[in-house]
Image: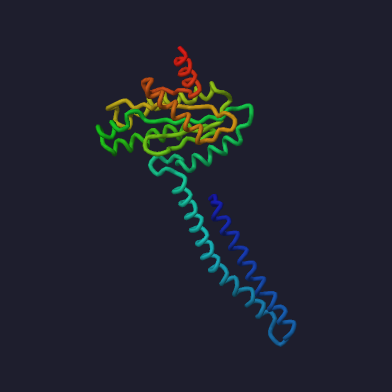
């Protein structure tokens, strides 16, 4: 049976406590025997050895149990603080922490990407099929995104029907392909959440980080691209840079 890291640490602590108890009992007793040789040495040494071995395991048991409980509570607190309860995805707080780390580690030869995705017509799903169906939709979309999370990236639920992705990709094209795959997977699979009574899709906007941009700024640009994706008919992924360029060209004409 493979022991957990917490249990191994607890057992090591218990062993150290036992060893220290024996040492702390035997050494003073040995010194005492040297001073007062009338006492039978074997009996005293046996007592000095046996007593701590009986007492220390009991103390170690309570210490190990307390440590395991503390570690379990710490994990629960970490989950509550960083994981969305409904979907199991990272929450907003965890997203920003991870995204900032990914951006710092992106390097010069790769691109850092942020995206925002929104479930299309989600209010209509709730109104038509009920809030339980809405929760099933969120769980289903969350499960799809969780299975798609890139190795150098994170997908999180920001709140409501809104999700965010941050990741490091080889180039803009690779990022675009990934975002389009997110849209396609939801369109192909998420309808099962409402028993094929309707089609479920998402709209997505993404952007490539420019030097000096913060994650908040990137999400703001991605959100503008998401808005454009909604106007473009939904169920699509749009690049913020392309959409803004197209806007500028349209304005010039």
* Residue 198 position in % (x across, y down): 29, 26
The answer to whether 58 is drawn above or below residue 70 in the figure is: below
Q: How many marks?
A: 0
Q: Quadrant of residue 100?
A: top right
- In depth, the one of 63 and 77 nearer the eye is 77
* Res. 197 image quadrant: top left
Residue 46: x and y in percent read: 64, 76
Question: Which picture quadrant has residue 6?
Answer: bottom right
Residue 246 in percent (x, y) is at: 47, 17
In the rendered image, the residue lying farthest to the bottom is 38
69 versus 20 height, above or below: above
Q: Residue furthest left?
A: 128
Q: Note whether 174 is above or below 70 in the view shown.
A: above
Residue located farthest toward the right when viewing the structure as drawn:
34
Tell me the quadrant of the picture where the C terminus can be found.
Answer: top left
State the residue in front, 224 or 62.
224
Q: Residue at x 58, y 56 (%)?
A: 9
Of all residues, the one furthest to the front in this rendering is: 252
Give the residue drawn at x 35%, y 28%: 120
Residue at the image point whose x is 50% and y is 31% from the top: 114
Q: Position of residue 77 (x, y in %)?
A: 46, 52
Q: How is the image coloured?
A: rainbow
């Amino acid at each position: 049976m493979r022991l957990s890291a917490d249990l191994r640490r607890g057992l090591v602590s218990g062993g150290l406590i036992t060893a220290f108890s024996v040492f702390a009992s035997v050494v003073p007793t040995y010194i005492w025997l040297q001073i007062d040789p009338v006492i039978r040495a074997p009996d005293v040494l046996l007592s000095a050895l046996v007593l701590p071995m009986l007492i220390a395991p009991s103390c170690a048991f309570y210490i190990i149990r307390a440590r395991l409980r503390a570690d379990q509570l710490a994990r629960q607190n970490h989950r509550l603080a960083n994981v969305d309860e409904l979907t199991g995805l990272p929450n907003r707080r965890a997203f920003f922490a991870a995204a900032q780390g990914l951006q710092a580690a992106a390097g010069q030869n790769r691109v850092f990407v942020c995206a925002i995705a929104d479930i299309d017509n989600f209010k209509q799903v709730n109104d038509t099929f009920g809030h339980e169906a809405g929760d099933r939709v969120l769980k289903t979309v969350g499960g799809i995104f969780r299975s798609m999370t890139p190795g150098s990236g994170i997908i999180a639920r920001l709140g409501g029907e809104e999700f965010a992705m941050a990741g490091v990709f080889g180039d803009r094209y690779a990022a675009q392909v990934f975002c389009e795959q997110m849209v396609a997977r939801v369109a192909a699979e998420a309808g099962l959440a409402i028993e094929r009574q309707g089609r479920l899709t998402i709209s997505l906007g993404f952007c490539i980080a420019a030097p000096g941009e913060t994650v908040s700024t990137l999400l703001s640009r991605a959100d503008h691209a998401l808005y454009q994706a909604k106007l473009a008919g939904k169920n699509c992924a749009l690049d913020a840079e392309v959409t803004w360029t197209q806007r500028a060209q349209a304005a010039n004409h």
